[in-house]
Amino acid sequence: MNLRGARFLFPVLVISLLAAGACRRQSPPRPEEQGPLLSEEAWRAEGREAIEKGLSFLRSRDPDRDGRWARSAGITAVVLLAHFQSPREFSPGSNPGLWKGLTWLESLQHPNGAIYPEQEGNANYITSVSILAMVLSGDPRFADTVNRARDYLVDNQLTGDSVYAGGFGYQDKAKTKDKPYADIVNTEFAMEALHAAGLPADHPAWKRAVEYLERCQHNSEYNDAAWVSDVGEYRGGFVYHPRDSKAKMLRTAGGKEILLPYGSVTYAGIKSMIYAHLERDDPRVKAAVDWIKKHWTLSENPGFDVTRDPNLGRQGYFYYFVTFAKALHALGVDVIEDEDGVPHPWRREVVSRIVALQNPDGSWKNVWHDRWYESVEELATSYAVIALSFALMDA
């Protein structure tokens, strides 16, 4: 396995519409919150500077240089990934704390290949992010650990007749065998890790994963679930898992209940389909790309009903940046047009938006909504650095 060569790499209430004319709305774009669009050389330099400040902040949060951030294996793995995904080259000699972190994660590997501490759980998530960090570190000493963790992920993929078959959940499936569960976030992290760890393209795990992704997408050609809608606002978008959307459910005037698609998981779906070796012109990929064109924004995680609380659109905001950048990078495009035909140089727009949100100390934090731990600076900062790093990569 070529460790350095793998660079392509990270949440039911019912809303009843009683009046036929009632509709959902999203908060409008907030261009005034985004910095000026600079020249190519200038915005790339600005992005690199923001990454450096972010990484310096993260290292300041490990004062003992023992490679354990927030005393959490999950957060540590994401922090390490942010470092190794960045444009900078890190070496064991000059940055021993990073390698101490990798070694700590390695020490948490179970006989079955999973990497996680029992008290923290989240076997799939921590294993997946640990694989990504170890692969990108370029250190061959972790090759066996990565291979064993990769085999674990393959074994941990759900199978059988459940709607969750083909997906991945937070926990070891052996602990949830009487109540199988998978969601698109854990699935996309696992698929990215399998991709980075070199799982062969013809491995059946990819086909099983695509079948799970189909059950999370609004596309009646591939998904016959009752909640699926081919109405333009929904078609192609993804939900959290086949029975839930963190953007909630809408009941139409005609009584149909629709799980609402939203941005971060739709981008996660796109990148996962690409990693699973679907072509860019595959109808499932094209439908998802059409959805993001209709909901193009960097001002919020689109798809949430913000009529009662405008900050709902900032749930998972930094994770949104990550999946946004990873998906569009995986698509191999530098410019994408929205539904009005307006071209968006997305790499420059991502850098401009994220840089505008950086704090003076180099950190980022979700100050609008603390859901999914994004009020934890180590996590939000790592997400921001990863998104910036993908935006600065060549197509």
Image (tube, rainbow, N blue to C red):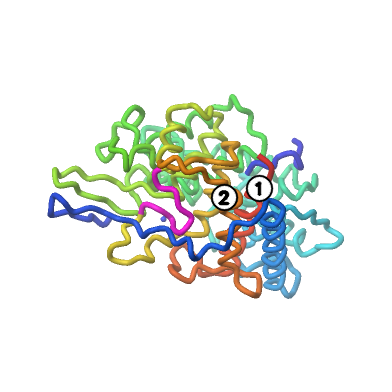
Mark 1 or 2: in front is 2
Q: Residue at x 83, y 58 (%)?
A: 92
The residue at which mark 1 appears reads as: 132
Instruction: Categorize mark 1 by other alpha carbons within 10 Å: few (<14), some (14-19), many (20+).
Output: many
Which residue sits at x=74%, y=68%?
Answer: 66
Q: Which residue is mark 2?
A: 10
Q: Is residue 96 above or below residue 247?
A: below
Q: Residue at x 58, y 69 (%)?
A: 377
Q: Position of residue 262 (x, y in %)?
A: 39, 49
Residue 276 appears in which quarter of the rendering?
top right
Q: Secondary structure at mark 1?
A: helix
In the rendered view of the protein, which quadrant contains the N terminus?
top right
Give the x, y percent position of residue 177: 42, 44
Q: Are marks 1 and 2 in contact (CB under 8 Å)?
A: yes
Amino acid carrying label 1: it is Leu
* 63 with respect to 130 (left or right): right
Identity of the residue furthest to the right in this view: 93
In the image, residue 337 lies at what x, y percent?
Answer: 48, 40
The residue range painted magenta reads: 294-303
Quadrant in which residue 388 is drawn: bottom right
Q: CA distance from mark 1 to mark 2?
A: 9 Å
- Residue 382 seen in the figure: yes
Q: Which quarter of the image is occupied by the C terminus? A: top right
Identify residue type, mark 2. Phe
Residue 100 coordinates in the image, percent (x, y): 76, 61
Between 384 and 195, the one lying in front of the other is 384
The reply to whether the magenta stretch includes residue 60 is no
Element under label 2? loop
